[in-house]
Amino acid sequence: MIKYHTTDNNIKIAEITDKNIRIATPDDALELFANLDEPSCNRIVVRESNLNNDFFDLKTKIAGEILQKFSNYKVKLAIIGDFTKYKSRSLQDFIRESNRGRTVFFADDLDSALSKLGKL
């Protein structure tokens, strides 16, 4: 299921609420874009649980491949979760750098994710 939020400045943000939606490959990201009911929506919130565990192991390069699709299609992404449990220094650096950018960022909760996506 996809829930849509509209910010005060009329930006539409899709929130993936279906726990059965899994993004494990770049093609899964493309399928997600295709299933959005709002064609003008270019901001998406997913939960950590919607991503395959390999996403958080940077050695697999899955994160880079999936996030490249978001970048190529000019879709901004917020990922909600508790990322402190990941002890990989490279992953923590990746999260920190992503949060400085304008395409992908990691948030603790939905309100933070919606606020950030609404400002981009």
Image (spheres, rainbow, N blue to C red):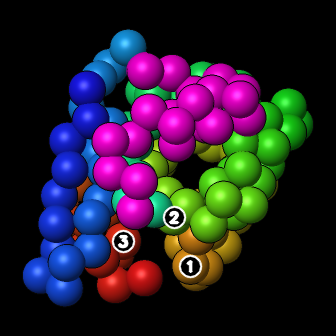
Q: In which quadrant is the N terminus drawn?
A: top left
Q: Determine contact: label 1, label 2, CB under 8 Å.
A: yes
Q: Residue at x 38, y 14 (%)?
A: 20
> Is residue 56 shown left or right of residue 82?
right
> Is residue 60 shown left or right of residue 92?
right
- Nearest the viewer among 39 and 81 is 39
Q: Residue at x 52, y 42 (%)?
A: 33
Which residue is the site of mark 1? 102
Occupied quadrant, residue 108: bottom left
- Amino acid under label 1? Arg
Please say whether residue 115 is one of the residues in the magenta stretch. no
Which residue is the site of mark 2? 76
Q: Residue at x 17, y 58 (%)?
A: 5
- Amino acid under label 3? Leu
Q: Mark 2: give few (<14), some (14-19) or many (20+) Cα within 10 Å.
A: many
Magenta highlight range:
21-40
Position of residue 92 relative to residue 62, above or below, is below
